[in-house]
Image: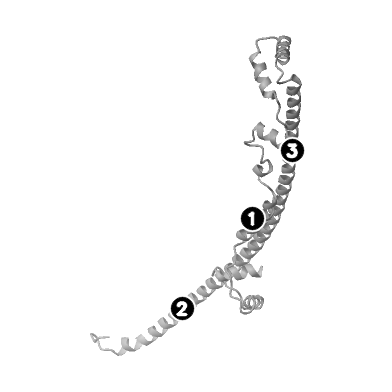
Amino acid sequence: MKGILSLLAKAKLIELSEDEQLAASAERPAAVPDAPAAQPAEVAETRMHAGTAAAAPDLPSLADACADLDGATFSDLFASAGVPASPYPAEKLLRLLDGLRAMDAGTRKSAVLAMDAADDNWQIDDCVRDADLKIAALEEHKRRLAEQMQERERQSGELVSQIRVVLDEASTAIRKQIAELEQLLEREVTRAAQETTSVEAGLRAAREATAREARRMDAEIERLREIPNTFKAPGAAH
C-alpha cells in the first residue's frame, strides 16, 4: 500500500503527509535512483505473460509433435519402416485388380492366378507378403501418431493448467490492488471532503469578518461625517 501511495504522489495525484513522506524515504534504498513503477494492471499482466512464457517452451508445436504427419508419402513411410522391395509390389497388383473390376470376385482371382502361373518372374505370394509388410508398417505409423497425439494432449493439458494457475494468481493480485486502490480512493474522498468543508468554513468566516469590518468602517465614516456636515461652508468642495 505504501508503494502505491508513493506512486500516486510521484504522479502528483495526491500529497503525502509528513509521516508518510518519512516512511517512504526510510523504505527507499540508499543511492538507488527511483525507477518508474508499473501500474497495477501492467504488473499483473507482466506476471501472467512471464508465467505463460516459462511454460510454453516445454510444449512442442503440433507440427513438431506430428512431424511426419503432413507430406510423408507411402513410399517414404515404407522405406523408413524397412519394407524390402518386392518382385511384384502390392500396388501393382492393385492396379491390375482395378482393371478387372468388371469381373466378379471369383473370376478376378482366377485371372490373377492364371497370370501368376504364366509368369515365372513373380508369385502371388510375393504380393501377399509385400501387402502384409506394408499394412504392418502403416499400422505402426498409425500407432506412433496416436502416441504422439496422446502426448500432445497431455502436454497441452499441463500448459492449460499452468495458464489457469497464472491467471488465478494474477486475478488475486489485481483484486487485491483494486481493493487497496478503493481504500485509497475512499480516504482521498474523505480527505477532500474535510478540506472542502474547512475551506468553505474559512470562506464563511472571512465573509463574516469582512462584513463586520465594513460595518465598523461605515459606522466610523458616519460618525466622522458629522464634522464636515456641521462645519463646512455650503458649496465648499469636499
Q: Mark on residue 49? A: 1
Q: Is residue 217 left or right of residue 21?
A: left
Q: Looking at numbered disc 3 in the image, what kind of residue is underneath it?
A: Arg
Q: Mark on residue 210? A: 2
Q: Residues within 10 Å of mark 2 (few under 14, many from 20)?
A: few
Give residue 178's position: percent from left, percent from top: 65, 59
Give the quadrant of the C terminus. Answer: bottom left
Q: Looking at numbered disc 1 in the image, what kind of residue is underneath it?
A: His
Camera-side residue of 87 and 36: 87
Give the residue drawn at x 70%, y 56%: 169
Camera-side residue of 194 and 215: 194
Give residue 156's position: percent from left, percent from top: 71, 45
User: Of label 1 and label 3, which has the lower sequence position?
Assistant: 1
Q: Quadrant of residue 49?
A: bottom right
Q: Is residue 140 left or right of residue 45?
A: right
Give residue 190's position: percent from left, percent from top: 61, 66
The span from disc 1 to disc 3 (Cα, nearest Å) is: 33 Å
Q: Looking at numbered disc 2 in the image, what kind of residue is underneath it?
A: Thr
Give residue 202's position: percent from left, percent from top: 53, 75
The span from disc 1 to disc 2 (Cα, nearest Å) is: 63 Å
**Where 223 falls versus 48 (above or below)?**
below
Name the element at disc 1: helix
- Mark 2 and mark 3 residues within 8 Å of each other at the beta carbon: no
The span from disc 2 to disc 3 (Cα, nearest Å) is: 96 Å
Give the residue drawn at x 71%, y 50%: 164
Q: Mark on residue 144? A: 3
**Where 3 falls versus 94 (above or below)?**
below
Give the residue drawn at x 73%, y 29%: 134
